[in-house]
Amino acid sequence: MKLLIQGTSRGEVFVESISVGSINSGLVVLVGIAQTDNQQLIDRLVERMLKLRIFPDERGKMNKSVLDIRGEILLISQFTLYANRAKGHRPSFCAAAPPEKAAPLYRYCVERVAKSGLKTETGVFGAKMQVALTNDGPITILLYSDDQQI
């Protein structure tokens, strides 16, 4: 699993020019599901994401989590996080889970984040989407299942 986390002052996702999810201050998270992923791994990465201290405290130091600031979260499925560019100019996505495996794990991820009590919005799994956001900081962090830090 890969989570591309962006600290934002606003985020919104559109399908066919219609807004399907929007947030104010918080996180826009692109979610890539690998063939080897499972619910236990999702639990660990979601907990790490929710506790990641990337928001400023009273002194301006990155010392608060999205939970601390009661931020909002926009989750967007993104299989292209598993692009393999080792050969040629056209990426391969073989490491990404096929839709029949990825969709239920993505839904589980959304449910797990929503249990935090924070406003949780999503895109539409498998749809062509347009994402608009204001990356605040800018802050962009990649968490992934190979990361020994999780």
Image (cartoon, grey):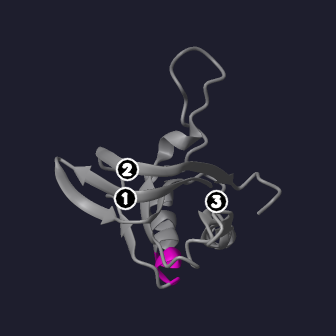
* Mark 2 or mark 1, earlier in chain: 1
Residue 95: give x, y in percent of width and height: 61, 42
- The residue at the point 34 percent across, 47 percent down is 131
Q: Which residues are magenta?
A: 111-116
Q: CA distance from mark 2 to mark 3?
A: 28 Å
The residue under label 2 is 133
Q: Nearer the viewer, residue 94 or 148?
A: 148
Residue 77: give x, y in percent of width and height: 44, 54
The residue under label 1 is 10
Looking at the picture, which amino acid does disc 2 mark? Leu
Rendered view: 87 above or below 38: above
Q: CA distance from mark 1 to mark 3?
A: 29 Å
Rendered view: 114 above or below 10: below
Q: CA distance from mark 2 to mark 1?
A: 6 Å
Where does the N terminus fall, quadrant-wise?
A: bottom right
Image label count = 3
Q: Is residue 113 visible?
A: yes
Looking at the picture, which amino acid does disc 3 mark? Asp
- The residue at the point 63 percent across, 62 percent down is 54
